[in-house]
Image (spheres, rainbow, N blue to C red):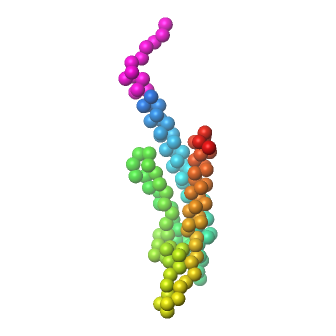
Amino acid sequence: MSKSISGEMLSKEIMKALEGYVDDISDIVEKDANEVAKEALAAIKQESPKGSTGEYSKGWKIKKIKKVKNMYSVKLYNKDHYQLTHILEFGHTTADGGHTEAQPHIRKVEEEYSKKFEDKLRKDIGGLE
């Protein structure tokens, strides 16, 4: 004997399954974002110009932002010397009319670890390669 199910019950079951899937994917994204952010933090501290004291490279931190359910982001920023990030990355004009040499360190870390994050997500979620 077969059991029948109404259209409404079917749609409720499908929605419940999809919500569970979204929650699972959200957990994977959050875990992978945190792991890659820690790796990127170590890399940007290593790549940052050291100067005489090394204070700039020590100022890098991670900020985790959960805006709403199923939305998560991780931000790397320089807490203590945020004013220097653009100046060091791109160089700047000096008071005597010269120009300092750029010391790119942010962009290459961002590009490398964005790709690593994408690859890690594809591997962990599976089937999206």
Instruction: Give the answer, above or below, for where 68 lies relative to 95.
Output: above
Residue drawn at x 51%, y 63% as measured from the top left: 76
Q: Where are the magenta residues, as a range?
A: 1-13
Instruction: Give the answer, above or below, for where 23 lies relative to 62.
Output: above
Return the x and y of residue 29 as percentages of the image width and height.
52, 47
Return the x and y of residue 46 as percentages of the image width and height.
62, 69
Residue drawn at x 49%, y 92% as measured from the top left: 96
Q: Which quadrant of the structure image shows residue 111?
A: bottom right
Residue drawn at x 50%, y 73% as measured from the top left: 85
Count of labels in the image: 0
Q: Residue furthest bottom?
A: 96
Q: Is residue 2 visible?
A: yes
Q: Which quadrant of the structure image shows residue 54?
A: bottom right
Q: Quadrant of the C terminus?
A: top right
Along the line of sight, the residue nearer the viewer: 49 or 102: 102
Residue drawn at x 44%, y 45% as measured from the top left: 70
Instruction: Give the answer, above or below, for where 41 lies relative to 94.
Output: above
Return the x and y of residue 39 as percentages of the image width and height.
60, 59
Q: Is residue 124 visible?
A: no
Return the x and y of residue 48 as percentages of the image width and height.
59, 72
Q: Residue furthest top?
A: 1
Q: Which quadrant of the structure image shows residue 109?
A: bottom right
On whether residue 10 falls in the magenta region, the answer is yes
On whether residue 5 falls in the magenta region, the answer is yes
